[in-house]
Amino acid sequence: MKTVCLYFQVHQPWRLKTYRFFHIGKDHNYLDDLTNRAILQKIARECYLPMNALLLKLIKENKGAFKVSFSLTGTVVEQFKAYAPEVLESFRALVDTGCVELLAETYSHSLAALSSKEDFKDQVKKHTAMLKSEFGVKPKAFRNTELIYSDEIGEAVGELGFKTMLAEGAKHILGWKSPDFVYAGAADQSLRLLLRNYKLSDDIAFRFSNQGWDEYPLTADKYAAWLSESEGEVINLFMDYETFGEHQKASTGIFDFVKSLPAAILKRGDLKFATVSETAAEHQPVAVLHCPHVMSWADEERDITAWLGNDLQNEAFSKLYAMKDKVRSLKSADYEYVWNFMQTSDHFYYMATKWLSDGDVHSYFNPYGSSYEAFINYMNVLSDFQIEVEKALAAKKSRKK
Amino acid sequence: MRVLMFGWEFPPHIAGGLGTACYGMTRGLARNDVDVTFVMPRASGDEDERFIRVVNASDIETVFGKVSSDAADIIDKMSFIHVDSNLVPYLSPEDYETYHDEFVKTGEKRWETSDLWSQRYTFSGKYGANLMEEVARYAIVAAQVAKDLEGQFDVIHAHDWLTYYAGIAAKRVSGKPLVVHMHATSFDRSSSDNIDTRVYEIERTGMAAADRVIAVSNLTRNIVIEKYNIPAEKVVTVHNAVRFAENEMALPERGVEDKIVTFLGRITFQKGPDYFVEAAAKVLKRVPNVRFVMAGSGDMMNHVIRRVARLGIADRFHFTGFLKGDDVHKMFQLSDVYIMPSVSEPFGISPLEAMRANVPSIISKQSGVAEVLDYAVKVDYWDVDSMADAIYGLITYPALAKMFAQKGLEEVTNLKWNDAAKKVKAVYEDAIASMK
């Protein structure tokens, strides 16, 4: 019996408004409220709401045999609360079925794991607290931003008490090995790793509507047959939730595909569904996975150069995290709020200069004309935030005296 | 005295030093009893086939807004002629090609970027397919203008190489003397072994055909004599001046308490933006409470941004993109130090505008404006240590900054277009006399 593990990533960044030099020191509203609302509501309409309704229906129809896992970033939950509370309700309804596992991740969809252990743990704890207060859930499994993983990050995740973590089934790490088994972390061997089967995941996420693909059109039966043919013990299908209705529009037939998928898979007899934690618990790790260098699920290279690959990104990143002690010492919710949305990885992605075909998915909602504009805008906002933090610290000091 | 002038005027958003100078000069000439018929290119983008439109002075938009508000005294001394054309100042053959390609690709008659980070430009597809063709076409229209206005002018004055063929054509048709005005040379626009030979040829031809050549500085005059082989007795230096806007803006509210050091101009090789960045990094190692601003856009902008990021000073070094209208003035008013580190600057009017706004200025010795200013700090453009020293001094010692600001303001107040126009008028008289 092979286990099919479906996991969806739900995330939206808080997009910054056009923030010019002349605003520095005067204007402390950094967000493009109209754009953020418009995009969130559009995706809610085209993806989150119809897809959640469909999944809820499928879970009920299959009486416990169909299961999925999600992770929702703190920033997307903040936006649900501000612009589309009914989406949050529909996620709660899914969680209440008992067939949906919520995973922990960084609160801001941040790159904190690449900054320091301290920053990383801060972000994870904040996210875990959010899951508790919004869904009443204590997560057992973890997925890092963009599936960024290394032995060291795995160790930190283990220290935070998680039993399972997701990672990319990257060829350069696996070599001849297959992603379709459970692995153990190198530094912390009690940590179980589920590796994404990128071929089968991308068949849905990227190739589903590609009419030039020789397997087009993809039907649920054909796809289920591929899953049966796979020779491992688990099949990890991880993808962005926006795949359904947004990257693959409703007109491509993606919702019909999803509608027939559980039945097509279950009727084969050799496949069953499980959540992330169940999948990890049901199978013994077959080997230790060594990953001394950082990898991710992005781009052909499966590395982190999409976020920290050029001077602009490195500068913005180091200037941001240089502020951490000051922001922390303020202990103010307002400053924490800005600090959190400034950490979101998307800001750094907009500054990438490595645009090849891989840029397509992420440039989808890129508000900037060039990486240089993205950098300037981000640094202007960060400069104002620096000034505000300094002012607040000075005020705090003088109060103490 | 009546002059037919091929000059530059344009709406506020694409103002550069050349347009500012032309505008100041024509006003000065009008006050010196010179009647100016001002011919200017402008891509209207509409479909009618007229090449030329005579425009009322009150309809002319300038860098300072509508002329009519404070120009009652010069309106009867000036008339304006618009020639529909894609020519704008500082246009290189390569730029023109880019715009033209864009036109061919999009098929739009009128093309304009709305990008904050680059200048706006209206391009109309019905004119020349490349810049040289357009320069020639403009000359044909100029000849027609000169013929139509026969007997209504005594001298022809052409600004910048793009209009030199027009000036020559007008001279041939009318037999009147030609004065060409060198605001910049090919050698300023690029390093000397890499100049555009087509542009150089037009500049040389224009100056050779002219009866007198006006250079904006002795620096430029020397280049004209040495590198274009123009007889020295034909070349006269007339320095630019600065115009005081009648209604000064209120001081904008400062957002930051740090000192602000500003570079404002096109971000191109000629303007030396790299040296400013290196000097900024040196100053920031010593003093924390200072911010640097680079206002403008240009082909070196991305390179400069990368360098700033690499030096790790991006939270103290800001980019505004291209500034227009009131934002330019606002930027001056927000500044504590202005810097113009040009590698080669025929004149350089922007430090005068900074000083007019009470901002002490640092200018490169390789600029024409250095010839007329005593109360500006002068450094070699490549000497980033001296540049850093000067910035440090001006932001650290208030007495020094105050002295430069006060004396500098007095100094630029005495640089009047009236006086410059008097010299230009004398050149006209000289040119007319030489024809007899």
Image (cartoon, rainbow, N blue to C red):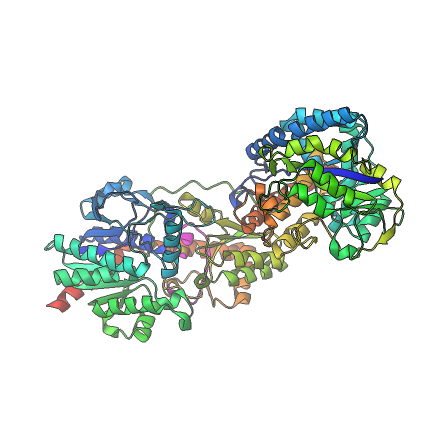
Vertical placement of residue A128 versus B277, above or below: above
Residue under the point 67% across and 41% down:
A204
Give percent across and percent down for residue A274: 81, 35
Vertical placement of residue A157 versus B297, above or below: above
Give percent across and percent down for residue A137: 81, 30
Look at the image and give the residue range highlighted in magenta: B351-368
Tell me, yes or no, whether the highlighted magenta stretch contains residue B95: no
How many discs appear? 0
**B100 horizontally vs B394: left or right:** left
Residue A198 shows up from this direction: yes
The N terminus of chain A - image quarter? top right
Give percent across and percent down for residue B125: 32, 49
Q: Within the image, what quadrant is residue A8 found in? A: top right
Residue under the point 68% across and 36% down:
A75
Residue A398 shows up from this direction: no
Towards the viewer: A120 or A184 = A184
Vertical placement of residue B300 versus B250, above or below: below
**B187 horizontally vs B178: left or right:** right
Tell me, yes or no, whether the highlighted magenta stretch contains residue B361: yes
The C terminus of chain A - image quarter? top right
Q: Within the image, what quadrant is residue B177 found in? A: bottom left
Give percent across and percent down for residue A379: 59, 48
**B21 horizontally vs A393: left or right:** left
**B391 horizontally vs B110: left or right:** right
